[in-house]
Structure formats: structure tokens, C-alpha cells
Amino acid sequence: MNLRKIYWLMQVSSWLLIALMAMKYTILEDANYSLSFQYAISVFASGLFTTHAYKLIVDKYNLEEASIEAFLLFPLLGNIVLGFLFLILDIRFTAPEILASNYSTFGDYFGLFIDDIWLTTPWFFFFHILRYVTQKQTMNEKMISMEKMLIKSELDALKTQLHPHFFFNALNSIKALMIIDHHEAREAVDKLSDLLRLSLNIGESQTVRIEEELKLTKAYLFLEKIRFDKRLMYHFEVDDKLINKMILPISLSTLIENAIKHGIAKLKNGGTIQIKIFEENEFLKLEVINTGTYQQNTENKPQEGGIGLVNLKKRLELQYGGEASLEMAEIDNKVISTIKIPLSKTW
């Protein structure tokens, strides 16, 4: 139910209740049914009209952003005006002889006025509670919307930085091949075209299916294999049940690029890259194991890795709010790079 419907439901129900209470507790106790009904209708209509006018005034002056004095003064004045209106209705619907015998002094009428204010006070109380809750909800929704927009803009900016960096290595592969074999170089250009198409397709989304990311990485590895030849060997171990899970675009590719640039490329005899995708302890794991060594600086950050890994860490933090991680370690002259994502976040 939207807030407008809630407001009118509160209006109608509260003024029906107040009208019934007014019939029971005012000086019309001994009035006939017709007069009591007219009185109740008058209270209901007057209250409904007056309080809605009050709402429009509060909306116009944006009471929540006004001073504390204005915030307290508005409902007080509104309650006094409504109480005075009900006092007029009481006088209008009461027989002159009853007024003359029971309400002969100013104090008597003032007491009736106070009773009418006491009757209408709950409306102002609940109205401002509802209004406060509504404003709070609206502000929270705006904040959440702004945070999502900010995160999306940061992710888009990071992906924009990543694309040129990613394709620079692929172009280097083709440049090296053109010196050796023009025909194979043309085939490599076709693969680069496929790589660009795949990258542009998945780059438009915040997350992509693992199957799409694998197509991208295989095209990239094909180009790098041309450049390194026998110095680069690779193989995949992928749990087929996970290929439809969603991950960050160009995340696995970044680990592979880093493994080649800072691992295989620095070894005279090259090495092997093993790509594993599996499930463990309610986490999806993307693991790249490459021949080489891993060094850390005093801040526990990769000494070598450049924009790719730094970028990937930022993207993981933005997308998953600290629930995902990128870890790197060296075991038996092999560097292991692992992305961990909660399975609950991969739908």
C-alpha cells in the first residue's frame, strides 16, 4: 500500500472514530438520533477538510526543515483552530435552553473548548508520526539510490580504465607475430576482433555469467599462446555446475593477464597456468595458479601487478561490500591468485 492510500485511510478512519466519540461525550447526549447523526457528519466533514488543509500548508512550508519553534507552533495552532471549529459546532447543535442553563460563563465555554482540543489532539500526534516515518523512509530510499548510483559510476569508471590496459597486451602479441608469420598474424587479428566483441558485450553489465568470462579468457590466452609459443602452457578445471553463476566481468581475465605478465613472461623457459573454478564452503572460487614467484611490500600489497589487480580489488569491494576477496600467495614456486565470492551473491 502506498503512502497516499495510508494517509487517506488514516484520515477517514480517525475522523470516523472522533465523530463517534464526539457523539458520546459531548453535550448532545440526550439529543435525538437525527440531530446526533447530523452532528457526527458535521464533525467528520469539518475535521476531514480542516486537517487536509493543514497537511497542504505543512507540505508547502516543508515543516520538517523549519526551526524547532515552527515545528511545535504549527500543530499547536492547528489544534486550536480545529478545537474552536468544534466549539462552534457544539454551540450550533445544542438547544438554547441547554446552553443557558449549563454554559452561562466564559469558564464553562472555555472548558468545552479544552474538551474539544483534547478530542482532536490524537490526530495531530499520529499525523506527525506518520509524516516523520514517511520523510525518514523517503530519505533512506534517496540515500540508497544515491549510493547505488555512486557505486555504479565507480564500477563503470574502473572498467573504462581496465579495457585499454587489457588490450594493450593482446596488441603486443599480434605485433610480435607479424614479424614471424603474416598469415598467423591475420588469424590473430580475427581472434582479437572476437576478443573485442566479447569484451564489449560483457562490459556493459555489472556482472556476467562464468561461461561468458571463460570465452573471453580463452580468446585472450589464444593470442598470448601465439606470442609465447611453448613457453606458455595452460589448462582449465571448471565445475560445469557453476558456468551460469554471475561474476564481475574481466575478473578471471585480469588474474590470467597478471600471471602471464608478472610470472610466465619473466621466466626463461616460461611455465604453466592452471585455471580452476570450483565451489568450497559456500564460496565460489576462481583460482589461477602459475609458475613463478610472488613478492609483497611492507603494506601487504602486490609489489607487481599494476592497475589490473588494484582495479579488481576495488571492483570486488564496490560490488560485494567486503564479502568477496582477492588473495595471493606462493606455494612451491607457484603463485596462487584466488577470487572468493559468496555463492549467495552469484545469482
Image (tube, helix red, strand yellow):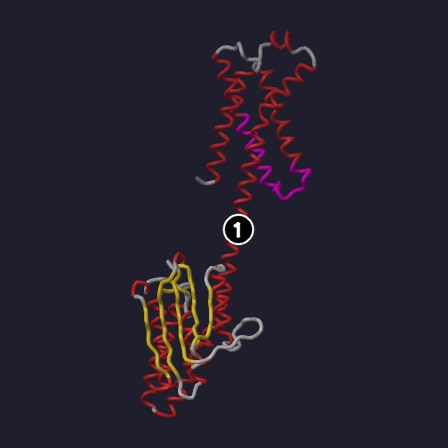
Quadrant position of residue 290: bottom left
Give the residue type that dot 1 points to.
Lys
Q: Residue at x 50, y 66 (%)?
A: 314
Residue 27 left/right relative to 343: right
Residue under label 1: 142
* Residue 305 coordinates in the image, percent (x, y): 49, 76
Residue 8 appears in view: yes
Is 347 inside the magenta-drawn segment? no
Q: Residues within 10 Å of mark 1 (few under 14, many from 20)?
A: few
Count of numbered badges drawn on the protein:
1
Q: Which residues are magenta?
A: 46-71
44 up-or-down from 299: above or below: above
Which sits in the foreground, 92 or 125?
Answer: 125
* Residue 294 coordinates in the image, percent (x, y): 48, 77
Which sits in the foreground, 325 or 114?
Answer: 325
In the rendered image, which quarter contains the N terminus? Answer: top left
- Please identify the dominant SS of the magenta region: helix
180 up-or-down from 200: above or below: below
67 up-or-down from 17: above or below: below
- Helix, strand or loop at label 1? It is helix
Is 56 inside the magenta-drawn segment? yes
Q: Residue at x 40, y 61 (%)?
A: 283
Q: Residue at x 29, y 65 (%)?
A: 240
* Residue 234 coordinates in the image, percent (x, y): 35, 78
In the rendered image, which quarter contains the C terminus? Answer: bottom left
The residue sitting at the left extreme is: 240
